[in-house]
Image (spheres, rainbow, N blue to C red):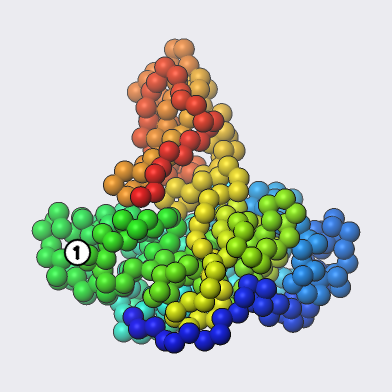
């Protein structure tokens, strides 16, 4: 994709201040009619009218995902954050559980600019390999594809790789959406089934949900000319995406993305690391100062593509104990709740590894005295699949390794 000459890019501070008018016009009113935000404003010893600029938001503590889960339990189902009378088209559930309403409007998660930056057009037939079951990811990207006017979307979801590869060849799929590791597995499945790689005119891929190391991108580009990545969350949607320059993630122009100090919560406008915090100005389901739990920092300098929004340097780690596995978050309290319900388990540890550019989840289990090993392994596999929506390899051991209930041993190369 060709890049246009660079226009004058806004600094992170200038980008943030461009939202002052939206903050002042929307948030004081919302803080009076939405119980979730009203409670947070009161707890911070603020009044709704105090939310009159982006700078004023620093006085409102960051809302963690754990706190949002607690709010939803206290004020079901959405923690008192849905605007009264707002129309909801779908409701999704992420592990936690955490419920996300989909506002009844075009592209409610705002991924259209990210797909356009990856070259998606009305001429593309798109394979969407994100899940359509409970998780919002499948619907997220289908809605963005509709706004672009793509020829059609093949709702592949996850699994049945050989069947998906066959459909892609037969139908002439030109664009892919999903995990980068799944694209690699899909291409390999087609080759192993004897399909001619040249028969699949795949031109572009938009990947997200997990890290994209340079070695994996290089391997994918042997078959797919354009492979660009994006960054976002199930709650807030699009929070950043690559352009053709592949020099960081441009933050969107329609949601406020900030990098905030881990101790004070104040916005950072230089290149220091902090937590990515999002404010989404939805008139149906606004989210104010939502902490993603991800670490990043602002990239230095302008981008050659000419886009004026600043860029995040990419994913630099996690703030808390949760980790992402195959696009889904795995939290210690989830595995504690899961394994605590199996009396035949004396001790355990979940280990996340990376094999051939694919996440592998393994559970080391110490059986309790008298437990049936085979039945115990079956129980752990079944309950992990049901509760966490993740497949797991079960290893029966005499003692688990160090690292707490979750050990991430992945090496990103």
Residue indicated by mark 1: 166
Residue 253 is situated, as x and y percent measured from the top left of the image, at 58, 78
Residue 31 is situated, as x and y percent measured from the top left of the image, at 80, 68
Q: Tell me, yes or no, if residue 210 can be seen here.
A: yes
Q: Give the camera-side residue of 141 and 249.
A: 249
Residue 392 is situated, as x and y percent measured from the top left of the image, at 39, 38
Quadrant of the frame with the N terminus: bottom left
352 to 10, vertically: above or below? above
Which residue of the protein is positioned furthest toward the top in this rendering? 369
Q: Residue placed at 49% from the left, 68% from the top? A: 249
Q: Residue placed at 56% from the left, 85% from the top? A: 8
Residue 193 is situated, as x and y percent measured from the top left of the image, at 14, 56
Which residue of the protein is positioned furthest toward the front in this rendering? 301
Q: Residue placed at 57% from the left, 55% from the top? A: 295
Q: Tell me, yes or no, if residue 80 can be seen here.
A: no
Q: Give the camera-side residue of 232 and 6.
A: 6
Q: Quadrant of residue 283?
A: bottom right
Residue at disc 1, secondary structure: helix
Q: Give the camera-side residue of 285 and 413.
A: 413
300 to 44, vertically: above or below? below
Q: Is residue 286 left or right of residue 396?
A: right
Q: Residue placed at 39% from the left, 40% from the top? A: 353
Q: Give the camera-side residue of 233 and 342.
A: 233
């Amino acid at each position: 994709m060709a890049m246009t000459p660079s226009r004058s890019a806004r600094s992170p501070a200038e980008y943030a201040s461009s939202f002052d008018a939206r903050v002042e016009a929307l948030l004081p009113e919302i803080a009076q009619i939405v119980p979730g935000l009203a409670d947070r404003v009161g707890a911070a010893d603020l009044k709704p009218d105090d939310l009159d600029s982006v700078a004023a938001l620093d006085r409102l503590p960051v809302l963690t995902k754990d706190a949002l889960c607690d709010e939803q339990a206290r004020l079901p189902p959405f923690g008192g954050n849905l605007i009264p009378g707002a129309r909801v088209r779908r409701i999704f559930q992420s592990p936690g559980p955490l419920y996300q309403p989909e506002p009844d409007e075009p592209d409610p998660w705002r991924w259209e600019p990210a797909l356009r930056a990856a070259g998606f057009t009305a001429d593309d037939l798109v394979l969407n390999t994100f899940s359509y079951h409970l998780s919002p990811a499948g619907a997220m990207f289908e809605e963005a594809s509709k706004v672009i006017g793509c020829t059609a979307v093949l709702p592949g979801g996850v699994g049945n790789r050989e069947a998906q590869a066959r459909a892609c060849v037969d139908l002439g799929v030109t664009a892919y959406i999903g995990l980068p590791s799944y694209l690699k597995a899909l291409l390999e499945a087609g080759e192993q089934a004897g399909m001619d790689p040249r028969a699949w005119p795949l031109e572009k891929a938009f990947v997200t949900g997990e890290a994209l190391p340079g070695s994996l991108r290089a391997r994918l580009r042997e078959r797919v000319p354009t492979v660009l990545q994006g960054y976002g969350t199930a709650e807030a949607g699009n929070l950043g995406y690559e352009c053709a320059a592949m020099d960081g993630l441009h933050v969107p122009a329609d949601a406020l993305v900030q990098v905030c100090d881990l101790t004070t919560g104040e916005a950072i406008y230089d290149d220091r690391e902090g937590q990515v915090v999002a404010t989404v100005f939805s008139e149906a389901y606004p989210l104010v100062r939502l902490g993603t739990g991800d670490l990043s920092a602002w990239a230095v300098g302008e981008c050659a593509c000419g886009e004026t929004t600043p860029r995040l340097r990419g994913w630099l780690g996690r703030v808390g104990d949760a980790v992402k596995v195959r696009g889904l978050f795995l939290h210690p309290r989830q595995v504690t709740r899961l394994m605590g319900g199996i009396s035949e388990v004396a001790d355990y540890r979940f280990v996340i590894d990376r094999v051939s550019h694919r996440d592998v989840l393994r559970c080391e289990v110490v059986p309790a005295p008298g437990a049936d090993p085979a039945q115990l392994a079956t129980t752990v596999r079944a309950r992990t699949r049901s509760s966490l929506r993740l497949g797991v390899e079960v290893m029966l051991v005499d003692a688990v390794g160090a690292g707490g209930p979750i050990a991430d041993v992945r090496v990103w190369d």
